Amino acid sequence: MEFLPISFQLTKNGEFAALLPRLGENSSRAVPLKDKNRAFSNFKVVSDALSIELAGKLGVGSIFTGAISSRDRGFFFDAMTFTDEYSEQSMGGTGVIATRWGVGIRVVLRVTERIVNASLNFGLVGAAVELQQASARYEIIGIGIGIEGLQIVLEELPALGDFRYETYQKLNSNIVKKLADHIKNNQATLVPQPVAVIINPPLNPLENSRAIYFAMRAIAGRQKLGEALSKANPTLDRDVIRSVYTQIAGIDDVGVQPSKEAEKDAETWLKI
């Protein structure tokens, strides 16, 4: 299980606001930070892909709200100093079993591909935009760095904008260096925030096996997305069904029928 980025907003009782409606009070509570100084022992950059659906549920960025296209992809870039805290019952527990506490910036990307590229990653997005293979929007979020720290970032880039290769270069050079220096010089006054979690069982739109199986059968039967959603048992997660249609059939329109190729892919999967 891997850490997932999440909105750092907590309720007064210490629960993640983004998780509370889905997991309830006990399961959505952050694992407390024992020693804030441990969070300032190193500075790291972590970047990875993130499903648009999941990013929306975790409140990672405002750019992940709204309608989702089959060509949309999400990425995040965390330049932070942090420490990880694990629950004492993490092996057998459910809900939030680990919390990452950190200080720094988070950059989230919403990329719309014009040419599908399975190997696309955060570092390559800018180049893909320059080559007109994709369009991308970014959002910069300052976490626990104070107004001065955020000003360091905003001197180089606006908080919202289009992501290009020059944007990535600035992030990975001037901004990261200045931010690391700011944190090092001001750690006595900075307060780490909860920035990522491990959840058991994993909170992932494609972890719901029953909904996945239902969607794959519907694709194999070449049912339109709207038909599949109308026929689905109320206990099945609609977001999961939509995600399967998007990833397997490239469909996000309720009125579109899966292609013959998607039908074959689904049939192959069902036979495994």
Image (cartoon, grey):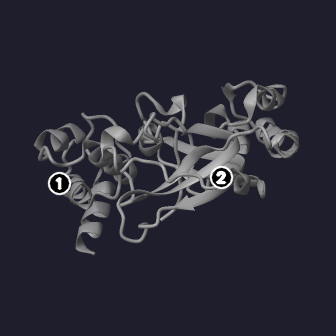
Between residues 260 and 237, which one lies in front from this camera angle? 237
In this rendering, does residue 128 appear at all? no
In this rendering, does residue 18 appear at all? yes
Between residues 100 and 37, which one lies in front from this camera angle? 37
Q: Judge whether 12 appears above or below 27 on screen.
A: above
Identify the amino acid type marked 1: Gly
To which quarter of the image does residue 68 belong?
Answer: top left
**Tag 1's secondary structure?**
loop
Give the quadrant of the C terminus: bottom left
**Tag 2's secondary structure?**
strand
Identify the amino acid type marked 2: Ser
Question: Residue 56: x percent and y percent?
Answer: 44, 37
Q: Is residue 98 left or right of residue 269?
A: right
To which quarter of the image does residue 137 belong?
Answer: top right
Mark before the other along the chain sequence, 2 or 1: 2
Report the residue at 77% width, 58% height from top.
41
Label 2 belongs to which residue?
47
Hey, which residue is sitting farthest bottom in the picture? 272
Question: Residue 188: x percent and y percent?
Answer: 80, 42
Q: Judge whether 50 appears above or below 226 on screen.
A: below
Label 1 belongs to which residue?
221
Question: Residue 46: x percent and y percent?
Answer: 68, 54
* Label 2 environment density (alpha carbons within 10 Å; few <14, some 14–19, many ≥20): some
Report the residue at 57% width, 45% height from top.
194
Q: Is residue 180 left or right of residue 137?
A: right
Marks 2/1: CA distance?
38 Å
* Label 1 environment density (alpha carbons within 10 Å; few <14, some 14–19, many ≥20): some
Question: Residue 240: x percent and y percent?
Answer: 30, 48
